[in-house]
Image (cartoon, rainbow, N blue to C red):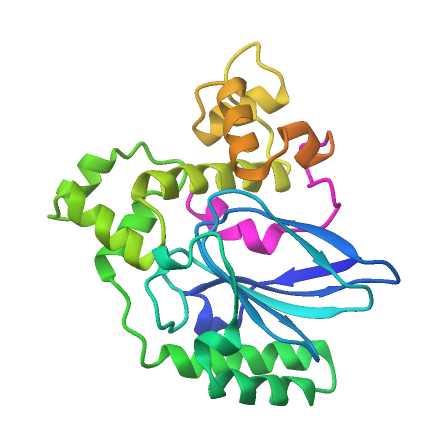
Amino acid sequence: MEYVEQLPVPGLSGVVRTVWIQRTGAAEHVHRHLPTGGVEIHFPLGGRPRLLGPLTGPAIEVIPAHTTLVGVRFHPGTAPPLPAVLDDLIDQHLSLVDLWGHTADRLVEAMAKAATPERALLYLQAHLLNEFRSTDRDALVQEAVVALMPWRATSIDGLASQLALSSSQLRRRCLQAVGTTPKVLQRTLRFQGFLALAQAGVVPSGRRGSDGTASLAIDAGYADQAHLSRECLRLTGLTPTQLLGGSLDRCACGHDHSASYAPFLARR
């Protein structure tokens, strides 16, 4: 299985975290989707595109053999235009045709005519650029997402006060625009921060006497390695060692996810 991800075209950098091309070989591929805080578009060329709603735990998908798929992963709170608020789409894999109607049908036809997957991915991004010209986003939720990124000691009540909202107002607006509560988003982003540190091969500083994983967990904002392990099991269904394949500089699948984790390291 081949997987190559990259940063989006510049015009989408404020809403899209990463884009990718995935190809399976002669055998089907069992893929484990992890919570990222955002939604994703999965577009198998010659097949039917789907939207992966915000995840609160792992989602296992079997991708057929000889499939070429292009994908887009959005930042939290920056989903493409949809006919529903995001908390209605939590932990769901939905037909994009059902959500977008004829727009998705036309997109499927155009993508099928692309000469290469790279061209198909560019066409999909061009479509999204046009869609986002008329999309309004909740500016306060965007501020909240930035404040809840890793490396910041932020309390939810303090964040609500900072945004001149009550805690219940912040919760409601996050549910609508992100799909999860601020607390769940904060936990998801903290774990993504840990994965970003591991992927980048960052030398752990952590706590004196701790080993690599425990020290890196502390760097990411966890109390200790046990805290990280509990969250990793909750969010991925695996232990940190199983997820990373025993290595602190790559995931078990061996793919390079540096483009996906760049936004986390840039804010560190």
- 196 lies left or right of 175: right
Which residues are drawn in magenta? 247-268
Q: Quadrant of the C terminus?
A: top left
- 212 lies left or right of 245: left
Nearer to the camera, 50 or 36: 50
Tell me residue 122's x, y (percent).
59, 79
The residue located at (68%, 28%) in the rendering is 241
Let me know if residue 222 appears in the view.
Answer: yes
Seen in the picture, residue 112 relative to 189 is either above or below; the reply is: below
Let me know if residue 142 appears in the view.
Answer: no
- State the residue lying farthest toward the right: 26
Tell me residue 194's x, y (percent).
53, 35
**Quick check: is 111 in the magenta stretch?**
no
Place residue 176 in its image quadrant.
Answer: bottom left
Tell me residue 18's x, y (percent).
55, 61
Q: Quadrant of the N terminus?
A: bottom right
**Quick check: is 250 in the magenta stretch?**
yes
Place residue 65 in its image quadrant.
Answer: bottom right
The residue located at (35%, 73%) in the rendering is 83
